[in-house]
Each structure stands twice: as C-alpha cells, then as structure tokens.
Image (tube, rainbow, N blue to C red):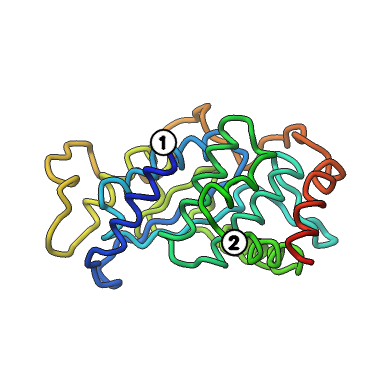
C-alpha cells in the first residue's frame, strides 16, 4: 500500500466517532526495526487495521526494541547492529513526539517500508514525505531521551509473561499469538465485546483460539537467542550520514 494512501485513510478515520477506550481491544506489537519479519508484518499486515477501519476498536501500542540487550555499561546492543539501534530509537522518539497512533504510525510505516526495500539509510526522507517537522525527533534523540525511552521498552519487553521468544511478538489483550500472528485480525474481532462489530469481522472463519505455546520452530522470525548478525553499518558511518542534516535542525 502506498504511504500516501495510508495517510489519506488515517485522516478519514480521524474524523469518525471512536469506541470508548475501555471497550477497545489492546494490541501490542513488539518488534525491532531491521528484522525482516518485523518489517513485513508492519507494512503488509498491520497497516490493514487502518485501511479497514479496525483501528477504531483497537488500542494499538508499538514497542520498537525487540531482541536488543543492555550491556553492563548501560549501552544498548541491537541484534542487527548500530543501524537498528538508531532506528529503534528514532521510532521510539516519533511515538513519544506524536503519541496518537494515527500520527506516529505513518512515520513508523514509512521507515519500515524503506528498511524492507534495503533503503534504511534514507529514513530521514520520511519527514519530507509525510510533511512532518523533524525537530521533535532530533531533539529527543540528541538529548538522550530516546535512550531512556528504549530502556523503558526494554523493561516492558523483559517483563512479558510468557517471555517473548522472537519478533514480531504480537499480543492481543495480554495473549501472545505466537506463530499465528499474521491472523491477528481474527483474534481482535473475537476479543471485541462492544456493539457495532466492524464489517471486516463479519464472516471470519479462521480458528480464533490462541495457542498456549509455539507449535513449532519456524524460519520467518528473528529469534531472541540467535547469534547477532553482522551490523549493516558501523557507528561512524551512521554518525557521518546524520551529522549534517541534524546539525542544521538543532542550530
């Protein structure tokens, strides 16, 4: 789906009446920005709840941390290297700067689509594409707030029960969907107890009893305990690629 079409659908939704917060189904997505399966889930599956109107009954929370680890000196080490740490923090800052999910999701979607296309170094183009002011994100990142946000995400991820085994780790009303996460819409529809069931929920026939545990290992996720892969870039390359534009923003 083109990002411009996604934005249009979000703007249309923002003018509609919404379900009371206490009736909404809680959907939390734990992911990391350069995990291919996380990218795929966000750009090919998760966006659908905005396109089909299901977001009106969903309390969506995005957690961009995933399988990262905090070392003894407080630094964060990410599974896919320094670029992933940068992009995790950037997305955390965007979520903080624009807390309404209809405001922050287009940015996350834009960045993840670039990642999926191998254009992760072009993430700053999303500000221009979406006509967003980059300064709140730049300030958040440069001030250290972004790191603090990532530590909070780390604590939340570590506290998961049952513990997450891989990403994307999709949770509906506290229940992890394990390897059935692609069918998350069915679980949302089953969990919703309010009136006016969304049209998309009518006629769903997929089994909607969440598994108690992963059925079997599978290849299209990023496992928590797998060896860290080689970084896609060095920290010095990241700093040099960002320096000019961010110095201008913060001047």
In the rendered structure, find residue 44 and report the number of the disc placed on it. 1
Q: Does residue 48 appear to the left or right of 19 in the view shown? A: right
List x then y, in percent, for residue 24.
28, 65
Residue 93, x across and y down, in percent: 62, 62
Mark 1 Cα shell of 10 Å, populated few (<14), some (14-19), many (≥20): some
Separation of disc 2 and disc 1 at Cα?
26 Å
Q: Is residue 12 left or right of residue 67?
A: left
In terms of secondary structure, where does tag 2 sit?
loop
Closer to the camera, 56 or 180? 56
Q: Tags 2 and 1 in contact by the CB under 8 Å rule?
A: no
Q: What residue is shown at x 66% (from left), y 56% (from top)?
A: 89
Front position among marks 2 and 1: 2
Q: Residue at x 73, y 33 (%)?
A: 229
Q: Secondary structure at mark 1?
A: helix
Q: Nearer the viewer, residue 108 or 156?
A: 108
Query: Crowding at label 2, few (<14), some or many (≥20) Cα neighbours within 10 Å?
Result: few
> Which quadrant would residue 94 be assigned to in this image?
bottom right
Q: Which residue is mark 2?
A: 133
């Amino acid at each position: 789906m083109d990002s411009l079409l996604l934005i249009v659908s979000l703007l249309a939704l923002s003018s509609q009446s919404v379900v009371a917060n206490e009736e909404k189904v809680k959907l939390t997505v734990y992911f990391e920005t350069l995990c291919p399966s996380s990218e795929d889930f966000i750009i090919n599956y998760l966006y659908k709840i905005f396109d089909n109107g299901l977001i009106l009954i969903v309390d969506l929370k995005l957690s961009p941390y995933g399988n990262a680890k905090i070392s003894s000196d407080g630094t964060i080490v990410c599974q896919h290297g320094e670029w992933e740490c940068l992009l995790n923090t950037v997305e955390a800052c965007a979520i903080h700067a624009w807390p309404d999910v209809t405001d922050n999701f287009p940015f996350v979607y834009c960045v993840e689509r670039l990642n999926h296309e191998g254009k992760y170094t072009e993430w700053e183009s999303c500000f221009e594409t979406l006509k967003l002011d980059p300064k709140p994100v730049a300030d958040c990142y440069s001030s250290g707030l972004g790191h603090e946000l990532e530590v909070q995400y780390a604590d939340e991820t570590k506290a998961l029960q049952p513990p997450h085994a891989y990403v994307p780790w999709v949770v509906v009303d506290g229940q992890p969907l394990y390897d059935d996460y692609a069918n998350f819409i069915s679980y949302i529809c089953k969990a919703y107890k309010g009136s006016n069931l969304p049209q998309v929920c009518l006629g769903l026939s997929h089994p909607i009893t969440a598994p108690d545990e992963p059925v079997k290992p599978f290849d299209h996720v990023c496992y928590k305990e797998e060896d860290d892969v080689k970084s896609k870039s060095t920290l010095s390359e990241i700093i040099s690629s960002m320096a000019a534009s961010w110095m201008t923003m913060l001047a």
